[in-house]
Image (cartoon, rainbow, N blue to C red):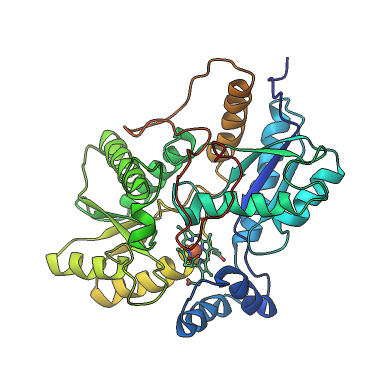
Amino acid sequence: MPPDIAPYDALLLVSFGGPEGPDDVVPFLENVTRGRGIPRERLEEVGQHYYLFGGRSPINDQNRAFLDALRVDLDEHGIDLPVYWGNRNWDPYLRDTLAQMAADGVRRVACFVTSAYSSWSSCRQYRENLFDAVDALPGGVDGPDTPRLDKLRHYFNHPGFVTPVVDATVAALAELPDDARIAFVTHSIPTAMSEGSGPPEADGTYVTQHLDVAQVVVDAVAEQTGRRHEHALVYCSRSGSPQTPWLEPDVNDHLEALAAEGASGVVVVPVGFVSDHMEVIYDLDTEAKETAERLGLPFRRAATPGDDPRFVAVVRDLLLERAAVERGEEVARAAEGSFGACWDRCPVGCCPNPRAARPALTGVPE
Ligand SMILES: CC1=C(CCC(=O)O)c2cc3nc(cc4[nH]c(cc5[nH]c(cc1n2)c(C)c5CCC(=O)O)c(CCC(=O)O)c4C)C(CCC(=O)O)=C3C
Ligand SMILES: [Fe+2]
């Protein structure tokens, strides 16, 4: 018997999108930063990061590889479900994908987002993008033929995400002295966005979730190697105006501090990212690595989950879990650490938009 996927009749991979060639870079950056007040110099600088790699972000190819692996995984487990892909900032755009899904007669969709943690940028903004895409359909959000969307829960603490990170950390540590440090890195966000992240009664869910995973990884590494490494959570890819406070310390400043302390080496673990996209290959593999070289600090970057089969299988696990929930059944929810399995529907007021309240799908109705 194939697993029961009712009520779903489609899966949707929701991602960021990236430029595929030099001519795409400026229009892509305009899509990303429309109405955000990002200084011109910052945009020119980020444009250079893309030009350094031929004007092509790796993110779309990584999503294509993930989709291929996901289709194989579902097929191998007897799950016959069409898988679609839509992005916030580049082709295939969510709006076009939703139009195709509606044309194909899709009714009920499970959405998997390529961002693992709670914040406006990494969760709620996607929920707003889903609203806009569905709102653009002929029948609008409540139309009789409009597909209904659910967002699969956050997976930052799912064993299928955490275990590849643990393995990658162990492998990178093996190339450095025994007392090397671990620097967990994630995307910086404005401190105001960070404080507002997650359910309204919690404070700063974005940071809490990252610290929880960091602890899980450090413990699992200690179990495997017998060594508990000193570690810290640090940030990359700060943007915005210099007057606005963002989460710190920056990874480069942290490397300076480690070198000053006489650290023997550092493994940088990009725990905030699911694949080796531009933040990883530029901000870490290029910039932070150069900083470490200048400081004479031995440096290794741990792999991201990418299309590791254990991470690909998270989609199937969360799909089956949520399908059971929607059918009113009891489910076991896989989660490591102390944060616990996340909610299925973001509560009212979760990760508010820092600029203006905007409608969003897949949460508790507001
Ligand atoms: C939390 C977070 C994630 C992590 C979650 C996740 O992994 O998804 C993430 C992912 C990504 N961010 C990406 C690219 C960019 N993000 C920007 C700008 C911003 N990101 C922010 C936050 C995040 N972003 C914020 C608060 C801004 C300021 C503007 C605003 O308030 O929205 C800008 C504008 C230039 C700049 O200012 O840097 C670019 C080009 C790419 C694609 C990479 C590629 O092409 O390979 C990916 C996956
Ligand atoms: Fe970003």
Q: Would residue 197 appear left or right of 72 to someone viewing this image?
A: left
Measured along the vertical axis of the image, is residue 137 above or below residue 280? above
Report x, y in % for residue 179.
Answer: 19, 52
Question: How many circles with numbers are drawn on the protein?
Answer: 0
Measured along the vertical axis of the image, is residue 273 above or below residue 246? above
Q: Nearer the viewer, residue 116 or 288?
A: 116
- Residue at point 42%, 52% (across, down): 272
Q: Which of 63 and 265 is in front in this view?
A: 63
Q: Nearer the viewer, residue 11 or 282?
A: 11
- Residue at point 68%, 70% (across, down): 20
Measured along the vertical axis of the image, is residue 79 above or below residue 23? above
Report x, y in % for residue 326.
Answer: 62, 24
Rendered-image quadrant of the N terminus: top right
Q: Would residue 4 appear left or right of 337 to someone viewing this image?
A: right
- Residue at point 32%, 76% (across, down): 243
Q: Which of 17 and 141 is in front in this view?
A: 141
Q: Would residue 112 appear left or right of 154 to someone viewing this image?
A: right
Report x, y in % for residue 187.
Answer: 41, 60
Rendered-image quadrant of the C terminus: top right
Report x, y in % for residue 233.
Answer: 29, 54
Q: Does residue 274 appear in the picture of this structure? A: no
The image quarter containing residue 103 is top right
The image quarter containing residue 9 is top right
Please identify the residue farthest to the left as the structure is shown.
Answer: 261
- Residue at point 72%, 19% (across, down): 2
The image quarter containing residue 250 is bottom left
Q: Does residue 146 appear in the picture of this structure? A: yes
